[in-house]
Amino acid sequence: MASRSYLINSNDMSLMDKRNYRMTALAAGLQRCGEKGIGNINADIPGLAGIPPAEMDRRVATIKAYIETGKWPTTIDQRELAPLTDFVAGAPAAQDFWVTPALAVVGTVYTCLNALLAYTFPAGRLMVCYGVSVDVAVLPISRLIFRRGSAVGNIQAQFDMQPMGTRLETAAFFSEPVVIDPQDPFAIQVLCNIIAGATPVHIDNFLFEIAGTTTA
């Protein structure tokens, strides 16, 4: 399937643009939950079961219209990533926040989640990533990379971050959301272009899981 990977600076989007983008990302995540057996989206949303799986755009539009009313599927919970507890047992991140190791070598890739090079969600949990923000005065990274399989696996998506630095932007949205499936090892990395210390690189995300898994 073709994909488009580029960043849209936050200041180039209106508040309505941002709201619409987030709603679409939420709807796409809920649709993916249905494909991966997380909850029962077809039963939760009236009329969805009658739309064939092949009609993806129509299904996502129906889900989006439903959640825009303020309703939410009863079998699926949504929150944001908690790095210490959300990955498979025995492989948590070192801290409960997004931060790279020290960026010591120009031209080297570094993980966005402390020292953990790759991560895996257990069955029943997936994540949709839709944007990035960097809390530094001078941007020390030039590229954001999503990989599947391992820290050296195939590239799922990559984004050129240099325009953020030249325009002094701190946040941007992805041209298309990046979906991370359950039980599918993945890595989120940045490419160093200026030597710097540990750098907060926050990946804006929606995490989905079976209702009641984390919060009863």
Image: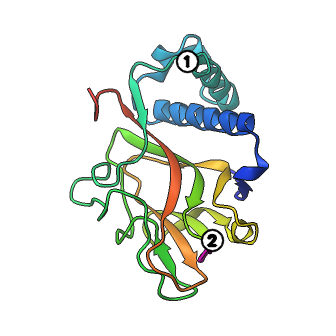
> Would residue 4 be seen by someone viewing this image from the given angle?
no
The kind of secondary structure element at disc 2 is strand
Q: Main secondary structure of the magenta part?
A: loop
Quadrant where the C terminus sits is top left
> Mark 2 — residue?
143
Q: In this figure, what is the number of numbered marks?
A: 2
The kind of secondary structure element at disc 1 is loop
Q: Residue at 44% of width from left, 63% of height from top?
A: 149
Quarter occupied by residue 126: top left
N-term mark: 1 or 2: 1
Residue 158's label in the rendered image is none
Q: Which residues are drawn in magenta?
A: 138-142
Residue 6, image x, y percentages? 72, 59
What amino acid does circle 2 point to?
Arg
Q: Nearer the viewer, residue 40 or 29?
A: 29
Q: Nearer the viewer, residue 11 or 116?
A: 11
Disc 1 residue crowd, few under 14, some 14–19, many 20+, Cα 10 Å: few
Disc 2 residue crowd, few under 14, some 14–19, many 20+, Cα 10 Å: some
Q: Residue at 76% of width from left, 40% of height from top?
A: 14
Q: Residue at 78% of width from left, 50% of height from top?
A: 12
> Mark 1 — residue?
70
Mark 1 vs mark 2, foreground winner is 1
What amino acid does circle 1 point to?
Gly
Residue 31, image x, y percentages? 54, 31
Q: Residue at 21% of width from left, 59% of height from top?
A: 90
Query: Above or below — where is 133 with respect to 82?
Result: below
Mark 1 and mark 2: Cα distance apart in space:
36 Å
Query: Above or below — where is 154 with respect to 45?
Result: below
Quarter occupied by residue 22: top right
